[in-house]
Image (tube, grey):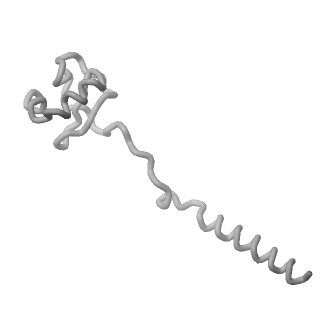
């Protein structure tokens, strides 16, 4: 009986120790992917359509944040990025 009580205390103690060790280790947790770049877009007009941009619809290409009028234009841009990047220069 004493052995069962001691074993129970050890298990509970180890469980508490392990959970205490895991708390506060944010670097061990996967970081959420950022969907928006932190820099201002390099353009004010969509390089695909020529329409005004939506600053929330962006990608990073060649180190520059490029904004588009809609998500559909990103797909067209990715087919030939050099063609559209030339429009931004």
Residue farthest along the bottom direction in this orientation: 3
Q: Residue at x 57, y 60 (%)?
A: 24
Answer left or right for 88 relative to 54.
left
Answer left or right for 55 relative to 88.
right
Q: Quadrant of residue 57?
A: top left
Q: How many marks?
A: 0
Nearest the eye: 39 or 50: 50
- Give the image location of residue 81, x and y in percent: 14, 34
Q: Residue at x 32, y 39 (%)?
A: 38
Q: Residue at x 30, y 26 (%)?
A: 71
Nearest the eye: 39 or 49: 49
Residue farthest along the front direction in this orientation: 79
Answer left or right for 70 relative to 10.
left
Q: Residue at x 80, y 75 (%)?
A: 9
6 is higher (above) or lower (below) than 72: below
Q: Quadrant of the C terminus?
A: top left
Answer left or right for 16 relative to 46.
right
- Give the image location of residue 19, x and y in percent: 65, 64
5 is higher (above) or lower (below) than 20: below
Q: Quadrant of the N terminus?
A: bottom right
Residue farthest along the right direction in this orientation: 1
- Give the image location of residue 55, x and y in percent: 30, 26
43 is higher (above) or lower (below) than 62: above
Q: Quadrant of residue 79?
A: top left
Q: Quadrant of residue 82?
A: top left
């Amino acid at each position: 009986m004493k052995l069962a009580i001691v074993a129970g205390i050890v298990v509970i103690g180890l469980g508490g120790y392990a959970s205490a060790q895991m708390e506060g280790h944010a670097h061990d947790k996967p970081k959420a992917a950022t969907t928006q770049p932190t820099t201002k877009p390099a353009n004010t007009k969509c390089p695909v359509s020529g329409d005004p941009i939506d600053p929330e619809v962006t990608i990073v290409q060649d180190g520059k944040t490029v904004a588009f009028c809609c998500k559909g234009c990103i797909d067209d841009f990715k087919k030939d990025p050099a063609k559209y990047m030339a429009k931004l220069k």
